Image: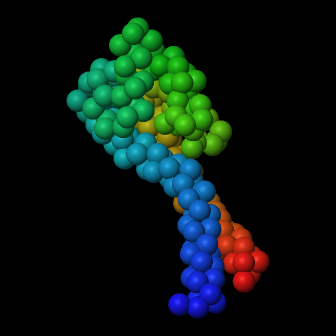
Amino acid sequence: MSEWMVKLGAAAAITAACALAGRALCQKEQRRVSMLQAFIRALPQLRLSMLERLTPLEAALRESGCPLFAHIAGNMADGMSACEGWQRCREELTAQGAMLDCLLPEDLQRLDVLFESLGGTGKSGQQLLLDSAESGLLELLGKANARAEERGKLYTNLGLLLGLAIAICLL
């Protein structure tokens, strides 16, 4: 095999690796989309448990199928309100590398609004709160999907261009 073929193979490998590295940089955006989807999927179950079955809030949060909601329920078992349980989770889980590190401040604010009043009003008030939370999270999910797609393309293309630049320098 000629030296030229080896250089071309190395250039192609470097270019592909850089493109994949660029794609990997947007994983946080994909995690945000997944997290928002999990919250949205959990709200109907929470609504059903709380408003139809009249399950206590702590148990309803556990039954929702959302790991964050279950974590908040665990805090409530320690005698905290839903708001206090959320605040503790927020402090613990928004650190770099934690479950909620992918969420933006606007996502956290939407969850603040939900947990400030969750379990604190009557059935109609809770219905309005959950409806508002769901519509707000759906809006955030739309923005998150657009951002993830945009950044995915951007980082992949930047990685590809960097890989090409390196390949050109090698040749």
The residue lying furthest to the top in this view is 79
Q: Is residue 44 left or right of residue 126?
A: left
Residue shown at 57%/43% (left/top)?
102
Residue shown at 39%/10% (left/top)?
78
The residue lying furthest to the left in this view is 53
Q: How is the image coloured?
A: rainbow
In this orientation, does residue 128 appear? no
Q: Quadrant of the C terminus?
A: bottom right
* Count of residue discs: 0
162 over 71 or under it: above or below:
below
Residue shown at 62%/60% (left/top)?
147
Q: Is residue 74 left or right of residue 106?
A: left
Pick whichever, 2 or 112, lies toward us.
2
Residue shown at 57%/32% (left/top)?
94
Image quadrant in which you'd find residue 97: top right
82 over 109 or under it: above or below:
above
Percent of width and height locating residue 101: 57, 38
Percent of width and height locating residue 92: 54, 24
82 over 16 or under it: above or below:
above
Pick whichever, 84 or 74, lies toward us.
74
In this orientation, does residue 28 appear? yes
Percent of width and height locating residue 90: 55, 27
Pick whichever, 66 or 24, lies toward us.
24
Percent of width and height locating residue 91: 58, 24
Image quadrant in which you'd find residue 18: bottom right
